Every structure is written in C-alpha cells, then in structure tokens.
Amino acid sequence: MANQLTDDIYTMKTVKTVSLDDGISWEQVECPHCGSSPLFVVATALDGNINVDPNQRTRWLRCPHCLRGSLLDRGTMHPAPVPLREPGGLPADVAAAWSQVRQCLQVGAPTATVLVSRAILRRLAAGADAADQAAEPGTERCTGLVGLVEHLVAEGYLTARMKVWAERLAPAVDAADDLAVTLEPATARDVASFTLRTLEAFYELDEVMGEGSADS
Ligand SMILES: [Zn+2]
C-alpha cells in the first residue's frame, strides 16, 4: 500500500520528510470521494513546529482506498464531502439521478437539487401508478408533491407522517422551475433528505429483505 500511495508522487526540493509509520502521516478523517478513513498525509505544512494545532495546519491527503486527493485546510475539507448516502437496491437510472442530487447539494446548487429530486419522486410515483393501474384500470394519476406522497402512502410505501413533511416542502418543490422563486440551501437539503427516505422505503427495504420480500 505504501508504494501505491507514494511511488508516483514527486515533491519539490528541500522537503523535510517523516516516516510512513509516524502518526502525523495519517489523518483520522473520511475521504470526501468514497468515505474511507483514515487518509494518508502526502504533505503537511507545520510552520516549523511538529506540535502545531491540527486545526492550524494545511494537509494534502490521499485516500488508500480510491487514491484520490483532498485538502484539509485548517479544519475544512476540500472538496466538501458528498452529502447524504446511497440507499441499496436502486435501479441504474435512479442511482444516477440520486448521485446528481448529492453532487448538486455538494456544490451548493439548491434549485438543481430540488428539480432532480422532484424528477426522482415523480418516477417513483409513476412506478407505483403503473402497478396500481394494472390492478385497477382508470385510476387517477397524481400531480404535485402532496399528491405524489398521498399516492405513495396509499400504496404502503411511505408512512402518513411523511405526508406532513411533504406538505411543508410542497410549495418549494412545486415551484422549483419558476425563475421568480429562489430556493434556500436548507430547503434543498430537506427535499433531498425527504427523497432519500422515499428511496429507502421504495427500494432498500426490499433489498435488505432479499428474495423473500412481500412483493415476490
Ligand atoms: Zn477515497
């Protein structure tokens, strides 16, 4: 691992070195790309004092797992970690869309976060709708976030408490494509968290339960 971590790295001249085994060579933080920990410290600025407060140092890091780089600058990680998590059991197209939501959140793009989240929620409702219409032709299609969630509650995918949450978020979600509306980052985070809960209920539970799930 040591060779893979260091063999392709070139450094400037007049660099002072520390051993790979030295505690200062490893940082107990999570990789912002893949979540692994700890990270290897490729270089650190100590300002001549090895005991300098970690929050006053700048450290250039490399992940032993994904080999990507990051920078821990006086306590702040760059790039910022990708927020939220990926639930298990997502189909490829939903997984790609959910990855976009997380990246939009990461770079601070609230409107894009909400628009892609809404597309995911609509896709889920359409899936539930298709199953519904197969059983009961002519069932009305739902519109708007609250309609979507009422539908998913009726289908048993979500609990009724999610409806209260949906009612609070609905004005922002339903107006996300209105250029006159400015979405706050906290609202986007809430919508993304709501979408995550919905994805967990829709896909992850079945995956966790395996082939013996209620649907089979
Ligand atoms: Zn990594």
Image: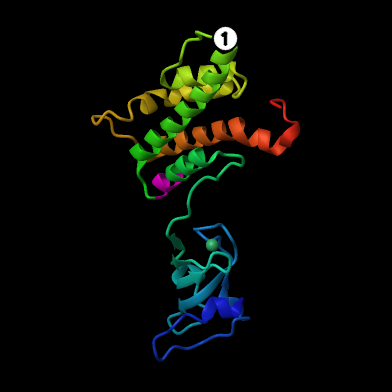
Q: Residue 111: x, y in percent?
A: 34, 37
* Above or below for 27 versus 132: below
Which quadrant is the N terminus positioned in? bottom right
Across the whole image, how many numbered discs are drawn on residues? 1
Q: What stretch is highlighted in magenta?
A: 102-106
Q: Is residue 134 above or below residue 112?
A: above
Q: Residue 18: x, y in percent?
A: 55, 85
User: Which residue is pictured at 36% across the width and 47% down the height?
Assistant: 108
Q: Which residue lies furthest to the left in this view?
A: 180
Tell me the residue that label 1 is attached to. 136
What is the image's colouring? rainbow
Vertical relation: 153 (above or below) 195 = above
Q: Tell me where residue 68 appears, x and y as whole percent.
A: 48, 66
Tell me which residue sits at (54%, 14%) in the image: 133
Q: Does residue 54 appear to the left or right of 207 in the view shown?
A: left
Q: Where is residue 174 in the image (x, y as percent from the top left)?
A: 36, 24
**Residue at the spot 33% in from the left edge and 26% down from the top edge:** 175
Residue at horizontal 47 percent and vertical 45 percent from the top: 99
